[in-house]
């Protein structure tokens, strides 16, 4: 009995579709292989192959993906953080996002009564800028309070001066702070510890690197080292 090959008796259009799928599969393999090779040879200083690969794929597909960075969280394609805001700086002057246009920023949302994580992360920001040398002078460090009830401009002025001479403190009304936090997708909530008459603020604790265009380029997790942040930002500044 003659052996019938799989698909030999299938209609012509089925065989045609099978052939198209095979060709597309081969092309996808070649495309991915080429993108991986380009990522390997074209990755930037401090950039992992996987991050460079994602950037290559975004470029091939016409997507707009922020430049990845060592120690930072790569934003997914299409995800946008940051945006317009109106707040009050530590000198009492009303400022908006337009006042910072054209300036790279390192932004942190915290509060002056924070017992541990906020001073740690602000110290990390200051150390990262110092580690960058002259390049660090291009970057403006900013603390946005999530406790505007207690963090007046005067309180912020005293607080930020303890970390870096160029650090800016921003506060505002509860509504203004909430709007800025929403733009950066910051979580915060008031909590009252047991047996305490005062309150603390529970909050997310990312450091945001914002490009001169006002777009968040990278997120840094809590406890990321100053050296990793410095290397990541230095790499990205070269491309700006």
Image: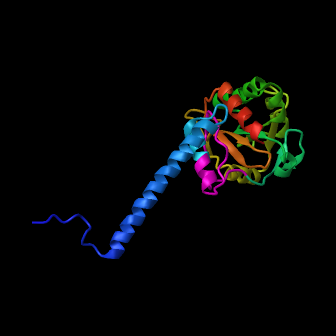
Taking the magenta stretch, the answer to whether it contains residue 193 is no
Q: Is 44 drawn above or below residue 11 in the view shown? A: above
Q: Is residue 101 left or right of residue 46?
A: right
Q: Nearer the viewer, residue 234 or 199?
A: 234
Where does the image place residue 58, in percent across and percent down from the top left?
61, 52
Where does the image place residue 135, in percent across and percent down from the top left?
81, 30
Q: Can residue 236 be seen by looking at this rendering?
A: yes
| Chief SS of the magenta region | loop
Q: Is residue 57 left or right of residue 108?
A: left
* Total numbered labels placed on residues in the image: 0
Read off the magenta span: 56-82
Q: Nearer the viewer, residue 71 or 201?
A: 71
What is the quadrant of residue 230 in the picture?
top right
Q: Residue at x 89, y 43 (%)?
A: 92
Q: Can residue 77 be seen by looking at this rendering?
A: no
Visual colour scheme = rainbow
Q: Residue at x 70, y 43 (%)?
A: 146
What is the quadrant of residue 90 in the picture?
top right
Q: Is 222 drawn above or below residue 93 in the view shown? A: above
Q: Residue at x 85, y 51 (%)?
A: 98
Taking the magenta stretch, the answer to whether it contains residue 77 is yes
Indicate the quadrant containing the N terminus: top left, top right, bottom left or bottom right: bottom left
């Amino acid at each position: 009995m003659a052996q019938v090959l799989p698909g030999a008796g299938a209609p012509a259009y089925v065989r045609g579709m099978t052939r198209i799928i095979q060709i597309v599969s081969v092309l996808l393999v070649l495309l991915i292989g080429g993108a991986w090779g380009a990522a390997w040879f074209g990755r930037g200083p401090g950039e992992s192959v996987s991050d460079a690969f994602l950037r290559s794929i975004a470029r091939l597909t016409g997507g707009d993906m922020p430049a990845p960075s060592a120690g930072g969280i790569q934003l997914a394609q299409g995800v946008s953080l940051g945006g317009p805001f109106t707040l009050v700086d530590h000198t009492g002057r009303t400022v908006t996002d337009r006042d910072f246009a054209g300036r790279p920023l390192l932004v942190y949302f915290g509060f002056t009564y924070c017992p541990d994580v906020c001073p740690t992360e602000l110290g990390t920001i200051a150390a990262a800028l110092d580690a960058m040398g002259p390049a660090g002078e291009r970057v403006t460090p900013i603390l946005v309070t999530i406790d505007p009830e207690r963090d007046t401009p005067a309180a912020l002025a005293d607080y930020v001066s303890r970390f870096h001479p160029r650090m800016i403190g921003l506060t505002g009304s509860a509504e203004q702070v909430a709007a800025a936090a929403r733009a950066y997708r910051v979580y915060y909530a008031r909590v009252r510890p047991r047996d305490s008459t005062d309150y603390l603020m529970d909050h997310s604790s990312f450091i945001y690197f914002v490009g001169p265009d006002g777009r968040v380029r990278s997120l840094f997790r809590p406890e990321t080292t100053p050296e990793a942040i410095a290397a990541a930002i230095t790499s990205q500044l070269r491309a700006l």
